[in-house]
Amino acid sequence: MTHTTAPTRPLDLLRLALRLDAAVTGVNGLAYLAAAPLLTGPLGVPAGALRGIGAFLVVFAAAVAVVAARRPVSAVATEAVVVANLLWTAASVAAVLTGRFDLTAVGTAWALLQAAVVAGFAALQLTALRTR
């Protein structure tokens, strides 16, 4: 008796990187929207600003999910996601350096951690795009 297996699709690193970005960003945005008053104290960011950031992140996450769902994944759209992620990274670091908000130590650490994660998404997306 012989067994045949279905051909396996190689891991689509680009689609995975975009989906991961969309999921993490969406959860973060929803958390800001749902818990803005509770996060104000620990982070040092006003609730209104957290709600605005949360709404932006939810919309951005949805857009990234759409990019990930397209067949094939658009290189131009992916490049736009990478640029947006790099801008977010720069803005997060700038917010810390300029004192844009009255960030607590936790808020400062959170902003810099977010910047690092988003920069990581951008690097992974760009690498995956170039190796397609």
Image: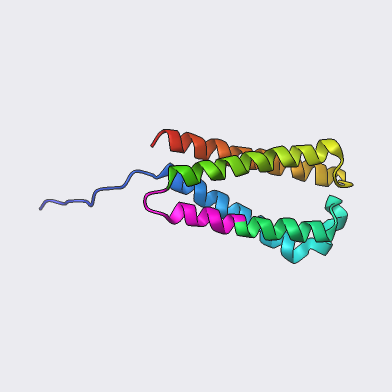
Specify whether residue 62 is painted magenta. yes
Q: 22 above or below 11?
A: below
Q: Quadrant of residue 86?
A: top right
- Total marks drawn? 0
Q: Is residue 3 magenta?
A: no
Q: Quadrant of residue 62?
A: bottom right
**Percent coordinates x, y for residue 59 in the rendering:** 61, 59
Magenta residues, dominant SS class: helix
* Nearest the eye: 92 or 12: 92
**Along the line of sight, the residue nearer the viewer: 7 or 127:** 127
- On the image, the x and y values in percent for residue 48 come to 82, 61
Q: Which residues are magenta?
A: 60-73
Check the image and name the residue furthest to the bottom: 34
Along the viewing direction, whichever of 90 and 127 lies nearer the viewer: 90
49 versus 112 height, above or below: below
Q: Residue at x 56, y 49 (%)?
A: 21
Q: 84 left or right of 74?
A: right
Residue 25: image x %, image y %? 62, 53
Q: How is the image coloured?
A: rainbow
Q: Quadrant of the C terminus?
A: top left
